[in-house]
Image (cartoon, rainbow, N blue to C red):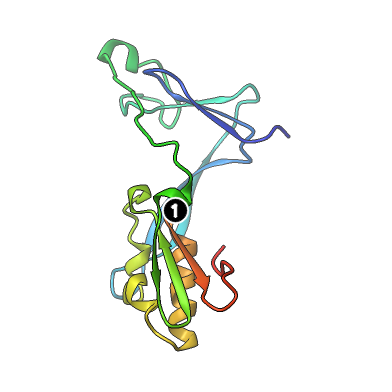
Amino acid sequence: MKALKITVLANGPYRVVGARQIAQLFIQPNAQGLSWSYREGKAFPLQEEGSLLCRCGHSANKPYCDGSHQPTGFDGRVEATRADYFQQAQLQEGPVAALSDAEKLCAFARFCDAGGQIWNLVEQTDAQSIALAVREAEYCPAGRLKVWDIQSQKQISK
């Protein structure tokens, strides 16, 4: 299988090559209504030469591009930073764990709020709070949050 590669085409779709699958993921709330887990939805077939995925929102064949961006004058300029994660992240040190947080990467999925907010959890000393902080970081779809062990200085979230 080819290595995963996503190319943003100028004023057009994403071209995805080497994906294992393309599927919908829905955020599932817990009993309190907070983002807690994912539920997989419909899976879409992959195209060997690469799947073109809609970025403009106008395709009648979502998630695939049908060329609808062309008559709408879609402006797909991407203005993302090329800065490394650690250049973007702020470090918050708690008594036993630290949190690195690259806020600009936020995807607003709200997994970081599920158990009392990750920023509060890393300020605790009990294993249950730290485990919940790790869980919240691992569910972050954008990779914004990472939890570190203060003593070893090693990342404990995936």
Quadrant of res 78: top left
Instruction: Relative to 29, say whether 150 is above or below.
Output: below
Q: Is residue 1 left or right of residue 122?
A: right
Image quadrant for the N terminus? top right
Instruction: Relative to 10, say whether 17 is above or below.
Output: below
Q: Position of residue 36 (x, y in %)?
A: 40, 67
Q: Position of residue 55 (x, y in %)?
A: 37, 28
Q: Nearer the viewer, residue 153 or 21?
A: 153
Residue depicted at 48% across the width and 81% down the height: 96
Q: How many marks?
A: 1
Mark 1 residue crowding within 10 angstroms, few (<14) / some (14–19) / many (20+): some
Quadrant of res 149: bottom right
Q: Which residue is mark 1?
A: 141
Residue depicted at 41% across the width and 26% down the height: 61
Q: Nearer the viewer, residue 137 or 19?
A: 137
Label 1, secondary structure: give it.
loop
Residue positioned most to the right: 1
Q: Position of residue 23 (x, y in %)?
A: 51, 43
Q: Nearer the viewer, residue 54 or 113?
A: 113
Q: Is residue 154 left or right of residue 139?
A: right
Amino acid carrying label 1: it is Pro
Instruction: Relative to 75, say whether 157 is above or below.
Output: below
Q: Position of residue 39 (x, y in %)?
A: 46, 57
Residue positioned most to the left: 72
